[in-house]
Amino acid sequence: MLAAVDFSHRMKTSPALDLGGLACLPAWLPDETFFSLASRYHVLTGNRLAAHTALSLFGEGRRGCSHDFPSRLRQFVHRAADASVSAEDIGLDRTILPFYLPLRSQSEAQQALESLTDEPRGMLKFRLGILTSRFRGHHPLKACVACMASDVAAFGTPYWHRAHQFPGVWLCPKHGQVLKEATIKSTGVERFGWTLPRHEQLRDSIEDGISAEVIAALGKLASLVANWVALPVGTHLSSIILSRTYRSHLSGGCTATFGMQSNRREWAEAYRDAVAPLRVLPELTALPATERQAAGQIERWLLHPRGNTHPLRHLSLIFWLFPDWETFWQRYVEIDSSASGREPPVSTRTAEFDPRSATVLALLGSGRSASASAAEVGVDVSTAIAWAAKAGISVARRPKTLKPDKLSAVIADLRKGADKQTVAQRHGISIQTITRVLRTEVGLRDIWQAARFGKDQKQARSRWSTQIASAPEIGLTALRAKQPAAYAWLYRNDRDWLMAHSLRVRLPRTQGAGGKVDWDSRDTSLSTEVLRVAASIADRMQRDHVELWRLYQAIPELKAKLGALDRLPLTRAAIESVTRRHRRVKAHRLI
């Protein structure tokens, strides 16, 4: 499994220095974004105006201040006079740009990077497909309250963590807390300013109560995003290979066919149900909400892949089809290697497909050690041990981080089907170590998978049975909406039981929404929200009017709709009604 890449070796962390044109440039903090570093510099210098800081950093008063895609990084490096870091390093290691690059060609990726290192080239967000994706493209700043507290204790200041800022990440990977969203920068408020996390400028990203199911879904998606952005620089994911990878899972390993029309409806239902817990977040409401929308996405990205799309589209498909990144990536590499005629990496090959495994097994049988056998054929020792384990041969190993008693405890937990991350945390070791134990202990992986399957099966059956017993009259569609995870697991892994226990539930006809935007519905919803928010703000501030900027600070999607108010007459009227008093007062003062 691809682990999150640590780029700290590429960026020198040194005490605060007076670097010529930049007075008191602070040291990089762990996982800090470039915008955060610049904001700390702004605080340290005591500059009254944000433009003064931009002038010091970039040579111009309103350059480089974007929190997601800064520009003129080369000018910053030149003014800092620090040879240990390049503008490209900052663009790739300290911004969210790498999230969008795996689906882009080499030339497109290079042009995008140059928009950060030098002058912006046209509309970067448009060229990356962000503005046409139906996902929010403003990239709100996000922070974890627990991280803020620990950062203040360790470094004396809170700061923006890069791992929190990627699209799709709404759960802190360290503390497991839902991230809060900033009410500035992405909303247009303090657009050119420099800011650090402050509690009074953060709001909850999810207004209603958060279920354990939503937390689990957010954690899984955040893990997928972390591995996605950790792909080596220059990695290009082909939409053709991605579609074959998805189809191979749905077709039971066959990539040549895609299944009958009846199957596609079932897949659409499963896809819709799988992503339902994610749609509680405004950023992820573009994920399919109906069977028809899900079917359209499956048709486009699995059957007839064309062009590029927002990475969250593909990440949502991976989220639906695969239990984790490791499973997806292994399948993708296998299909990519088969399509191009290349051999997959040794770490993803199994013994029966690599002729060197027979040599290793013969050497082990003659009494050679695992390390000597691996060196003889030119493979890693762990690979040789994994081949031996698959062949049923137990190999004596030199203890490294695991002493015999700890290894026994780890194996005991895994035999019970414990989650890898849980075992790793319990025994104070890495997930990679757990994976290595599973690969190299004879028969352990099969026992672990069987135990996990049994636990998951028991849990899913119990949840589904309880839901049916509580309200069988509401129909299968409504039942699936209440237990999407249980239904999806049973459909993929225990379908006969699911069908047998769902016979007494009527399957109502699903009326999917059309692909066109329902402007009337959008207008009604948005105008109601404008009036509600305006009343709340006016009551809190004891005023009879509300400024427009306060409205779109509280309603992020409103700003994007200001250019389409001719199609939203109710929303236009609502905005005018709550801001008119303010405009009349200003006009009266001018007379």
Image (tube, grey):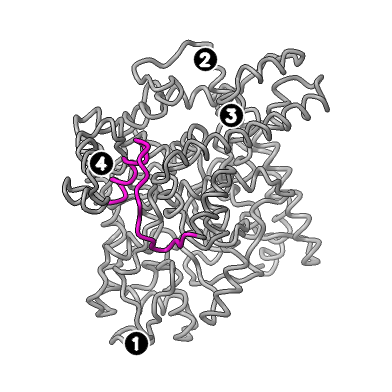
Residue designated by label 1: 17
Q: Measuring 55% from the left and 40% from the top, which residue is drawn there?
A: 564
Asked if the magenta segment contains residue 265, the reply would be: no
Amino acid at the residue labelled 3: Arg
Quick one: label 2, few (<14), some, or many (20+) residues within 10 Å?
few
Residue 365 image label? 4
Q: Which residues are magenta?
A: 381-404
Q: Measuring 57% from the left and 70% from the top, which residue is drawn there?
A: 197
Residue designated by label 3: 272
Work out how far the residue at label 1 is from the one at label 2, CA to CA, in angstroms.
Answer: 63 Å
Q: Secondary structure at mark 2?
A: helix
Q: Nearer the viewer, mark 2 or mark 3?
A: 2
Instruction: Name above or below for residue 342 compared with residue 32.
Output: above
Work out how far the residue at label 1 is from the one at label 3, CA to CA, in angstroms.
Answer: 53 Å
Image spot of residue 520 (x, y percent): 66, 31
Q: Secondary structure at mark 1?
A: strand
Residue 557 as seen in the image, left or right of residue 482: left
Quick one: label 1, few (<14), some, or many (20+) residues within 10 Å?
few
Residue designated by label 2: 263
